[in-house]
Image: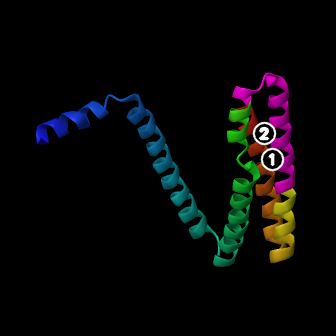
Amino acid sequence: MVTSSIKYIKSLGNSTLIKNSSWGIVSQIVQAVFMSLFFVIIARHYSVNEFATYAIAAALYQLMTVLSTLGLSQWFIRELTSTENKKRTTTAFFKLQFYFGIFFFLLNVIVAKFLFNDSLILQLSVLLGANIILDNIINAIK
């Protein structure tokens, strides 16, 4: 039984699914390590107040980024396989991603302005929030 288990585990190493999954897992780990190092360096360089301001703006940006996609990628894949007019569906997806990017960018700035009323948080929210539009466009292109 032990030898058959070992053979099974070794055979998994040759599986395409395992190889592709391991690349995804490794990339997530590397990304987490770099993000941790980034925050350690930022926290050491800036004062507590400045770092807290950045953390608030970054958290708000990340929340808006997650909300801005609205599961449109799954909808697009499902629609593209079942529709005959692929160009219209692709154009609609691109427009929706762009419009949602703009909407959530503006929402990011509005929430930063009214919830925190801090000029530095507002400036960071504008800078980080501009990336929401770019993320949505990149998501539409890929």
Residue 52 painted magenta: no
Q: Report the residue at 44% width, 38% height from top.
A: 21
x 49%, y 43%: residue: 27
* Magenta segment main secondary structure: helix
User: In terms of secondary structure, where does tag 1 sit?
Assistant: helix
Report the quarter where the C terminus lies. top right
Q: Is residue 68 above or below residue 51?
A: above
Q: Is residue 77 above or below residue 30?
A: above
Residue nearest the observer in this picture, 139 or 37:
139
- In the rendered image, which quarter contains the N terminus? top left
- Name which residue type carries label 2: Ile
Kindly indicate the quadrant of the structure image that contains residue 118: bottom right
Q: Residue 137 has which mark?
A: 2
Task: Residue 139: give x, y in percent of width and height.
Answer: 72, 39
Q: Which mark is residue 38?
A: none
Is 30 positioned to the left or the right of 71 in the image? left
Q: Secondary structure at mark 2?
A: helix
- Counting every numbered tag in the picture gives 2
Q: Where's residue 110, x and y in %?
A: 87, 66
56 lies left or right of 96? left
The verdict on residue 93 being magenta is yes
C-alpha separation, residue under disc 2 versus residue under disc 1: 6 Å
Along the horizontal axis of the image, is 28 left or right of 141? left
Residue at the image position 81 percent from the left and 30 percent from the top? 89
Q: Please tell me which residue lies in front, 133 or 88.
A: 88
* Residue at the spot of label 1: 133
Q: Are marks 2 and 1 in contact (CB under 8 Å)?
A: yes
Q: Position of residue 99 (x, y in %)?
A: 87, 46
The magenta segment: 80-104
* Residue at screen point 82% across, 49% down: 101
Q: Assess disc 1: are there few (<14), some (14-19) or many (≥20) residues with their C-alpha within 10 Å of its C-alpha.
A: many
**Disc 1 residue type (three-letter):** Ile
